[in-house]
Amino acid sequence: MRLLNASGCLDALTAPEVARELDAFVTKTVTPLPREGNAPTRIAEVEGGMLNAIGLANPGRERFIADTLPRLAELGVPFWVSVGGFCAEDYAATCERLNVDEVAAIELNLSCPNVDEVPENVGDVVAAARAASTKPLYAKLSPAADVAETARAAEAAGADGLSLVNTVKGLALDERTLQPVLARAIGGLSGPALKPIALAAVYACFRATDLPIVGMGGVSSGRDVLELLAAGAADVAIGTALFADPGAPARIRAELGAELAAFGFATADNAVGAAHGAGDATLDPESRLRLEKHLHTGLNMAG
Ligand SMILES: Cc1cc2nc3c(=O)[nH]c(=O)nc-3n(C[C@H](O)[C@H](O)[C@H](O)COP(=O)(O)O)c2cc1C
């Protein structure tokens, strides 16, 4: 199991000591052209988490490649680039430019709730990126639609893994005026409130595909990591928790060690898929075969 940050929740160049606590760093989503993002207010605290409507503010592909990428390469932490766009060609063009040794993997952001331009069909985007890229490709999906079906489309189009989940839409109203707090009104909900949604998405996709999953959504403790592993995540990312606690990666690792020991798991990889009881009578034969394969792979990885 690797511990990562969730895209947009850590700037490795301003907090390199936090990035070095991770097994891999994931960048903020990079789009072909620079974006200033949405007008403020872009962040609001809500029950069980936060809302953000940043709108993919980033320096754009060319400045990222010229300025940010060489500095990330000096960190000594493998890094993944989160790639965004508004049509399949956008994604493919950026992926092609990222076929360089320094980039460990690419996460295709197919699910930002804070931009008006919605990407095309997930299968088309993944297929275009696949044709352009030599890197492992992770498809980052929204839990809002039928995530298992979307995951199958991403797998069929050549994705190597899934990142689950992005935020879901939420609204916060001002206490006194009853007007939306965010300038765009609706933003993406992240933090503890997202955890059951993330668990459900990971659980469903573990059964629906053969792809390794990076689980995320409301992780703030070792117990949260253990639950995502049990639901079927092979790796886990920390997002919102990093804003309040930059020491979260080291703390969560220590807590996870204690949780694994309490449950008798020799390694984190042994816990992957533990929530999928082998005696589940609701499983169809195809899902059962896949499940057995997953669990077998997990055991092999651990051994
Ligand atoms: C302020 C903020 C910015 C984010 N920016 C991105 C982004 O650029 N690309 C992306 O794929 N996800 C982005 N996300 C979503 C996170 O990567 C993650 O999927 C989500 O927050 C759920 O994890 P969490 O509950 O641990 O925060 C952002 C989330 C927050 C809170």
Image (cartoon, grey):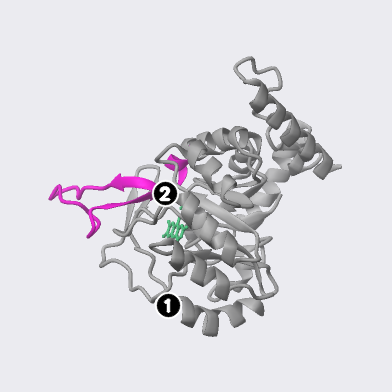
Query: In this figure, which residue is indicated by the disc labeled 1?
Result: 59
Q: Quadrant of residue 168?
A: top left
Q: Quadrant of residue 76?
A: bottom right
Q: Quadrant of residue 86?
A: bottom left
Residue 237, percent from left and from top? 58, 52
Q: Quadrant of the C terminus?
A: top right
Query: In this figure, which residue is indicated by the disc labeled 2?
Result: 167
Q: Is residue 182 magenta?
A: yes
Relative depth, front residue between 96 and 235: 96
Provide the residue span drawn in magenta.
167-195
Q: Residue furthest left?
A: 177
Rendered residue at 47%/54% (across/down): 124
Rendered residue at 75%/34% (across/down): 293
Relative depth, front residue between 7 and 89: 89
Q: Is mark 1 within 8 Å of ligand 1?
A: no
In this picture, is 92 found above or below 229?
below
Q: Is mark 2 within 8 Å of ligand 1?
A: yes
Compare marks 1 and 2 and give the one earlier in the sequence: 1
Q: Amino acid at mark 2?
A: Thr
Q: Residue furthest right?
A: 303
Q: Is 35 left, or right, of 105 in this rendering?
A: left
State whether residue 13 appears in this view: yes
Residue 122, percent from left and from top? 46, 50
Residue 265, percent from left and from top? 78, 35
Relative depth, front residue between 83 and 128: 128
State whether residue 6 appears in this view: no
Q: Is residue 288 magenta?
A: no
Q: Residue furthest top?
A: 281
